Amino acid sequence: MNTDWLNDGRKIPDEVMLYIRIMAVHAVRELGQSPEEVIKVFNFNRHCIYDWLRQFDEGGYSALESISAPGAEPLVTNAVDEWLKQTVTNMTPLDFEYDTNLWTCKILGELLKKECNYSAKINKKVLDTVFMIKNKNPFSQLNG
């Protein structure tokens, strides 16, 4: 059994953390226990219990649920992603009047700007994401 979570609360699953927060708040608000003593039992920093109590006071037990951060907007939209996959797997740069049959970031960037009015920079990270196409390797012609 992995016990890393005993020393690092960030490794405790969200569902388990919800139960811990509910038990801690219940002990303080319903049973009259000291917030300082309750949080010592769970081995968390003392500021946690006061955050949880504030959240509970503002929204009840449901306010103690974990909320995932929304994250950044994707660089590549679904439409651009699909266009890239179709273009790279079914065509070559020769089809667009380039003088090579090998795809490059520069060529794809130019085509995206022309064909999709997409101006974000195309880099290796974007291409790695796009080219994870099951059973198809658009660069297979490089290997022979």
Image (cartoon, rainbow, N blue to C red):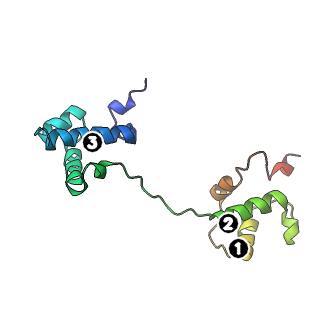
Q: CA distance from mark 3 to mark 1?
A: 48 Å
Residue 136 x %, y %? 79, 48
Tell me what residue is drawn at x 74 percent, y 59 percent. Answer: 85
Q: Nearer the viewer, residue 50 or 8?
A: 50
Q: CA distance from mark 1 to mark 2?
A: 9 Å
Residue that badge 3 annotates: 21
- Vertical side of 106 occupied by 33: above or below: above
Image quadrant where residue 118 sits: bottom right
Tell me what residue is drawn at x 25 percent, y 56 percent. Answer: 59
Mark 3 is surrounded, within 10 Å at the Cα level, by few (under 14), some (14 to 19) or many (20 or more) other residues, namely many
Q: Secondary structure at mark 2?
A: helix
- Vertical side of 101 occupied by 17: above or below: above
Mark 3 is on which residue type? Arg
Contact flag, marks 3 and 1 (Cβ < 8 Å): no
Mark 2 is on which residue type? Ala
Residue 96 x %, y %? 84, 71
Contact flag, marks 1 and 2 (Cβ < 8 Å): yes
Per the rendering, the mark at residue 79 is 2
Image quadrant where residue 11 sits: top left
Residue 144 x %, y %? 89, 46
Per the rendering, the mark at residue 116 is 1
Q: Is residue 98 visible?
A: no
Q: Is residue 18 visible?
A: yes
Q: Which of the two marks, 1 or 2, is nearer to us in this view?
A: 2
Tell me what residue is drawn at x 13 percent, y 38 percent. Answer: 31
